[in-house]
Image: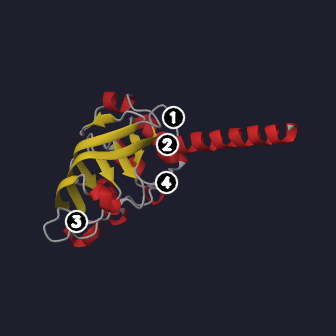
Amino acid sequence: MTESVRIQPPLSDEDVAKLHAGDHVLITGVIYTARDAAHRRLVAALDKGESLPIDLKGQLVYYVGPTPARPGGVIGSAGPTTSMRLDPFMPRLLEHGLKGAIGKGGRGPAVREALEKHKGVYLISIGGTGALLSKTVKKAEVVAYEDLGTEAIRRLEVEDFPAIVANDIHGNDLFEQGKAQYRQQEKLGSYVAGGA
């Protein structure tokens, strides 16, 4: 079993440089939630030269719109949403100090380039595990854009939140590595079947 790397935001360039595609991480500390509507507002504020409602420097943003908490609970189901639709916003936020994001699925070339340039990391979490992931959240509070409801920006305090590094600052992409490995195994299987 792969040993997990423990990380605690805010992250430095050095923290991020130690992470490689395929590493399993456990996050303890503060992460922020943000989805499409919040990203649009953050980038619009930057475009107008306005200050942001949260300090992104060194932080991780989790692409999630949690469900309401049950009575006595901290947060409802909190599974990741598809990351690619946030691609248009990610490079700009990385320029502004964001160190990474957590979501599901791959990222486009512009985001991968921006991660290398600005020393950021993209982490994936498993879709469909929202109820389990919510158990790592010890505290949750809305800190910006409350009118967005489930898409408001929340400050989560997490303990041992599990994720996997998909894209690192070294240009590695876990999804591309997986495809290459599959093609290699497929080629080897064809060779063996053909030679039998």
Q: Is residue 166 above or below residue 152?
A: above
Which residue reaches farthest left? 72
**Element under label 2?**
helix
Distance (Cα) linking label 3 and label 1 = 34 Å
Q: Amino acid at mark 3?
A: Tyr
Q: Nearer the viewer, residue 191 or 178?
A: 191
- The answer, for residue 48, to whether it is visible in the render is no
Residue underneath mark 1:
171
Residue underneath mark 4:
105
Q: Is residue 119 above or below residue 152?
A: above
Residue 188 appears left or right of 158: right
Position of residue 194 measured from the top left corner of the image (x, y, whole percent)? 86, 41
Q: Amino acid at mark 1?
A: Gly
Residue 63 appears left or right of 139: right
Circle on res. 112: 2
| First reached walking from the N terminus: tag 2 or tag 1 | 2
Residue underneath mark 3:
145
